[in-house]
Image (cartoon, rainbow, N blue to C red):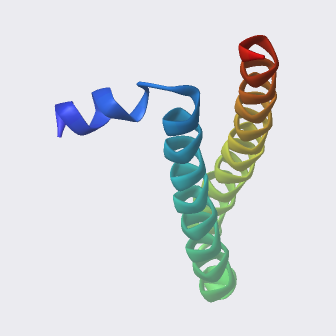
Amino acid sequence: MASQIGRAFESIESAQDFVALLAETVVEAKRDMEADVLKASTANSSRLDVLRMTLYSLEKLEGHMMKSCHILGDLRCQHDLLQR
C-alpha cells in the first residue's frame, strides 16, 4: 500500500487522479450521511445534532477537495506550458 501511495504523487497527473478518487469518496460519504440525517430526523436530538455536524464537515471537505482538483488542474496546465 505504501508503494501505491508513493506512486500516487509521482506526477501532477497521478496526484490529480488520486485527489479525484478521494473527492468521489467524500461525495459518497456525504450522500450516505444525508440519508442518515433523514432517517434520524425523528431520533433523539443529540444524535441528530452529531449527524448534522458530521454532514457539515463532509460538506466543507467536499469543497476543499473541489478546490484541490481545480488547483491541480491549474498546475497541470502551467506545467504543460513550461514544457513547450
Residue drawn where x is 70% and y is 49% of the image: 62
User: Residue 10: x, y in percent?
Assistant: 41, 24
Instruction: State whether residue 17 is above or below residue 10.
Output: below
User: Residue 64: x, y in percent?
Assistant: 73, 37
Residue drawn where x is 32% and y is 32% of the image: 7
Instruction: State whether residue 15 is above or below residue 47.
Output: above
User: Residue 56: x, y in percent?
Assistant: 72, 52
In the rendered structure, the answer to whether residue 19 lies left or right of residue 58 reads left
Residue drawn where x is 74% and y is 24% of the image: 80
In front: 47, or 74? 74
In front: 77, or 8? 77
The part of the image, by quadrant, that contains residue 5 is top left
Residue drawn where x is 54% and y is 46% of the image: 17
In the rendered structure, the answer to whether residue 18 lies left or right of residue 78 reads left
| Residue found at the very far top of the displayed protein | 82
Total number of numbered discs in the rendering: 0
The quadrant the N terminus occupies is top left
In the rendered structure, the answer to whether residue 4 lies left or right of residue 76 reads left
User: Residue 67: x, y in percent?
Assistant: 79, 36
The part of the image, by quadrant, that contains residue 51 is bottom right
